[in-house]
Structures are given as C-alpha cells and as structure tokens.
Amino acid sequence: MTASRLQDAALARFALQGFDATSMAEIAADVGIKKPSIYAHFRNKDALYLSLIPLMITAELDYAKTVLVGGDTIRAQIHAYLQSIQVRHDESFRVQFWMRALYTPPGHLHDQVMALMHVFMDDLEAIVLAAIAGSSLVPNPQGLSAEVLTKTCLGLIDCLQVELTYAGPAKFARRLQAVWAVFEAATHTPRP
C-alpha cells in the first residue's frame, strides 16, 4: 500500500514540478513517512520515476480501448479521443506526468523511458488500427487504407500533444479544429 501511495505522490510532484525539482523528502512528506522509508520500496528517485511509466502506459492503453471501438461512430470516437487530450491533461496529474515523460523525460533516463514509449506507441497503433479496420472509414472513395488512416490518427495525436505541451490550451483548440477539418474532408464518403 505504501508503494502505491508513494507512486501517487511522486506522480503529482513529477507532473507539477518535473523530475529535477522534485525531492524524495517532498514525496515522503506528502505520504506522511520519513524519507529513509521510501528506500524500502524504491532503490532511488530514478527507480520510483521509472515505476510510473508502465502504470501510465497501461492506463493510457486502457483508455484508448474504451474510446476507440470501431463501427459506424468511428469519426466521433476519434474526435472524442483527440479532444480528451486536453480535458484529461487539465483534470489529471497522471496525464500531465504522461505528457511530460513523453516529451521531456529526465535526460539520464531518456533511453529507458523511450524504449517503453516505443512499445506503447506500437500498442496504441494496434488499437487504432483495429478500430479503424472495423469501421465505416474503410473502404473509402479516396482509397485510404486502414493503415494510412491509423498513421494519420497517430500523427494527429502527436501534433496535438506537442501543441498542448508547448503552446497551451488556446492553440491546442485551434490546432484541433484545423486538423479535424482536414481529417473529416479526407475521410468523407458522399451519400448516394
């Protein structure tokens, strides 16, 4: 139980302050224990930080699986997932941590974090592909395959996360509106 409480406290601190500005003493104080007690659960701050990445990956993939299910409402599902990037970021330390880890991991942990993130991206791509392949988006008059539409969706996710991270909510909203208009135009199927 203490390990998960430490992870929750670390998650909030890392999300708000970043890795370098967060001390183990602060995390211990947040949980109500003495700093040396942390080391019964985590070897050091690096180990604590790295323990959060698989938790975030699982949560994000579970979320994607619940939103992106395919079928006739796939456009609405994709749009909801894209919109949720900002909503979930604003409401959750988990998503704030997630995006900070994805785009600005601690330099000395970069390779370890990115190795996990590459596996995550492959898994997310598989979820998006399954949803699109089993949807009304394919086949389409434009001849866009499920694979091309999937890679496009991943590109939209990437560009929106970057925009939110570096430019803020107002620019995120404008970017979402623009990229969504292009996605809808590219996937439009005229009615007979």
Image (cartoon, rainbow, N blue to C red):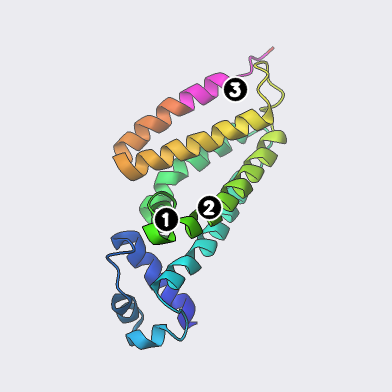
| Label located before the other in sequence (3 or 1) | 1
Classify mark 1: helix, strand or loop: helix
Q: Nearer the viewer, mark 2 or mark 3?
A: 2
Q: Position of residue 59 (x, y in %)?
A: 54, 58
Disc 3 to disc 1: CB gap under 8 Å: no
Q: Position of residue 75 (x, y in %)?
A: 58, 32
Q: Which residue occupies the extreme top position in the image? A: 192
Q: Which residue is mark 1?
A: 101
Up-down: is 154 above or below 57? Answer: above
- Inter-mark Cα distance, 2 to 1: 9 Å
Asked if one can make out residue 101 in the rendered structure from this viewpoint, the answer is yes
- Inter-mark Cα distance, 2 to 3: 29 Å
The amino acid marked with disc number 2 is Met
Q: In terms of image quadrants, where is residue 141?
A: top right
Residue 70 falls within the magenta-colored stretch: no
Q: Which residue is mark 2?
A: 117
Disc 2 to disc 3: CB gap under 8 Å: no
Magenta residues, dominant SS class = helix
Q: Position of residue 97 (x, y in %)?
A: 40, 58
Q: Which residue is mark 3?
A: 187
Q: Nearer the viewer, mark 3 or mark 1?
A: 1
